[in-house]
Amino acid sequence: MRYPRLLSLSQKVVFSILALTAFGISSVQAADGEQLLKESCSNCHQINTPDRASLTLQEKMTRKGPPLYFAGHKYQQPWLENWLQHPTKITPAGGGFWVNAVVVTDEGDEIDETKLTRHVAVSQEQAKAIATFLMTLKPYPELINEGEYTAKKIPRMLAAKDFRKFKGCVACHRDEKDFGGVTGPELYTAMQRLKPEYIASYIRNPTAWEPRSLMPNNHLNDAPIYKLMNYLNIIGGDLP
């Protein structure tokens, strides 16, 4: 007759162990992710916050991949975990400095596909660990205004005209798979890929994030910034 009590006690022990394991799992994953990054990713990506004086044009031109030292501010973790398992091209001209893979012609910029490399895919477990660690990299909290953006429905046609004609974003970025520039990252998945507060902050002042950013600072106030973000929501499928 004492077995039920013993079983109940065992369950309590098991539940306690599970609770402690769950509590510590994020820190374990982050530690594993840091090790993976140092071993496999640091040759192409900068993962330690640099001295800003070292971020010269020459440094930018020799990059093999985008910097990751502020990834915690920048990326959405679910997207990042999926992308690491199934990597696709975000910037048509590749992850390095675009001029290294672009040929300028009379018909426009063309991509030399022989200059591009494929990003390695990792396992689900590795992706989780790497993404968990990357989410801890937040060196610039002063640039982020949490919760500043609220999605708002706007007319798609007018928003597209603003993006393409009035703001000129289409010169470097694509808002459709086969339409737009090739030197900047595509933006039709931007709202799934990037955190809204990072998008707003980067548009507001690109060189605050990257001293040698080639993106122009148009000194936009909040309203036109949010208008652009509403368009990104539309083309990303988050707004009708």
Image (cartoon, rainbow, N blue to C red):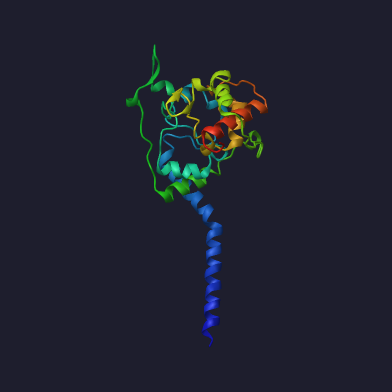
45 displayed left or right of 118: right
Q: Is residue 95 above or below residue 131?
A: above
Q: Residue at x 49, y 32 (%)?
A: 188
63 displayed left or right of 118: right
Q: Residue at x 43, y 42 (%)?
A: 84
Is residue 20 among the parts visible in the rendering? yes
Considering depth in this image, is 30 or 9 the residue closer to the camera? 9
Q: Position of residue 80 (x, y in %)?
A: 48, 42
Q: Residue furthest left?
A: 114
- Quadrant of the frame with the C terminus: top right
Q: Is residue 91 above or below residue 39?
A: above
Considering depth in this image, is 232 or 220 the residue closer to the camera? 232
Q: Residue at x 56, y 34 (%)?
A: 233
Quarter residue 115 falls in: top left
Is residue 38 among the parts visible in the rendering? no
Considering depth in this image, is 168 or 113 the residue closer to the camera? 168
Q: Position of residue 4 (x, y in %)?
A: 53, 82
Q: Position of residue 202 (x, y in %)?
A: 59, 29
120 displayed left or right of 3: left
